[in-house]
Every structure is written in structure tokens, then in C-alpha cells.
Image (cartoon, rainbow, N blue to C red):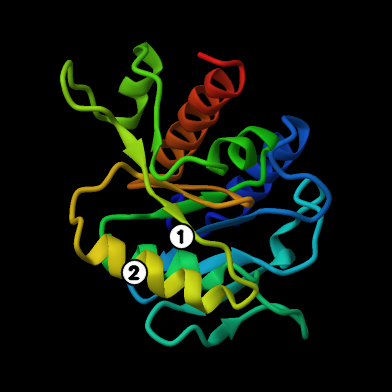
Amino acid sequence: MSESADPRPRLAAIGRLFYERGWMWATAGNLSARADDQSFWITASGLSKGELVIDDFLRIAISSGEVLEGGAGRKPSAETAIHRAIYETQPATQACLHGHSVEAVLASRGRDPVVLPHVEMIKALGVWSDRTPIALPVFANHSDVALIGQAVKNFLSGHPRPVPALIVRDHGVTAWGQTLSEALRHFEAVEFLLALLARGF
């Protein structure tokens, strides 16, 4: 079975990895991957990402946000609107990963955008320039996550080839990619670079 046919086992494994690395404390964070052209799987709300199984994911319609499959009465992740905005505006995206690291929260304070350290690791994001700083957009946090999702959609609609990651202030990083492996690489690279910032690099 291909990754796109049922990405949930791989998402659950990534959840365990992120939990162990301190990127998904308590029940924080969420993970998603396309089910098909019109929908994606995403973690249900309120779950430890270190203990996920395939029944902990819901299939969501990209266009409407409607729950199409799974859940057994559970709600989709609160950040579903952010994932939808990325899938809608970045049609090649196959997966989105969102975590809540200490470094991301620290980096989002007093910086907008977050300019990433210009070190070798930045190449993992698929970008490199000797002249242009590479920066992540910072979005205001809202209890109504739909407002964040709309802001993300507006930004990405005007930036068709963005760096494949963003930060929500006092919240965390979301990274995406054309495969689950690429999304994982992007997320890991951003967290490495934010850890440098946290150390005063």
C-alpha cells in the first residue's frame, strides 16, 4: 500500500518521534496527510501524539472542513483550518506537520518574520541564497483558529512559492511537503534552526 493510500501508520510513527523529541508536549500538535485530491487525514483533538493509532485520525474535506470518515464522535484537531489553508493554496502538498516546541515559542516573540540562521541546514528547506535572508512568516494567535487559517490562506495565496513552513506566535511551527518524508525533513530543519536562535546564534 502506498503512503498516499493510507498515511496514518506513518503519521502515528511521526507523532511518537515528535513526542519523544519534545515537539509535542501533552496533547499539543497535529499531523495530517492527504487521503486523496479532495480530502486529508488529521489527528483528532485532545490526544497524546506519543500514543496514536490509526483510529485516532479523521478524514476531512479540503473544501468544506466536513468530517468524512472516522472519529467515533471525536472532533478534528483545532488547527484543521491551518492545514486546509495549506492544502488549498499549495496543491502539491501531501502532508503538514505541526508541533509546539519551546524554541518555536521563543522565536516567535519579538520577531516578525523569523529570520533563520544562514547555516548549512537551511538547504534542507530547498532554499539557499548568499544574499537574501530566509524568513518564516509569523501569524497572530487566536482562540478562534479559523481566523489563523484565513490569515494563512491569504498569505499563501499571495506567495505561490513560499518557504514550506510558518510560525503561529506563542504556539508553534507548521511545515509541509510534497511527501511525508519531505514534510518531516522541513520540520526537523526548522526546529534545528530555531534551536540555534534560542542559543543566541
Q: Is residue 55 left or right of residue 65?
A: right
Instruction: Report the residue marked by disc 1.
Output: 5
Upstream in the sequence, badge 2 or badge 1?
Answer: 1
Residue 167 visible in the displayed image: yes
Q: Report the front residue among 1 and 171.
A: 171
State the SS at label 1: loop
Q: Residue at x 69, y 38 (%)?
A: 23
Q: Residue at x 52, y 41 (%)?
A: 110
What numbered label is drawn on residue 14? Answer: none
Q: Is residue 58 left or right of residue 71?
A: left
Q: Is residue 10 left or right of residue 162?
A: right
Q: Residue at x 73, y 67 (%)?
A: 55
Disc 1 marks which amino acid?
Ala
Q: Report the front residue among 130 and 97.
A: 130
Task: Say which of marks 2 and 1 sits in front.
Answer: 2
Disc 2 marks which amino acid?
Lys
What numbered label is drawn on residue 153? Answer: 2
Q: Position of residue 10 (x, y in %)?
A: 59, 46
Q: CA distance from mark 2 to mark 1?
A: 26 Å
Q: Report the front residue among 98 and 40.
A: 98
Q: Which quarter of the figure has residue 34?
A: bottom left
Q: Report the front residue among 170 and 29.
A: 170
State the SS at label 2: helix
Q: Is residue 157 above or below residue 144?
A: above
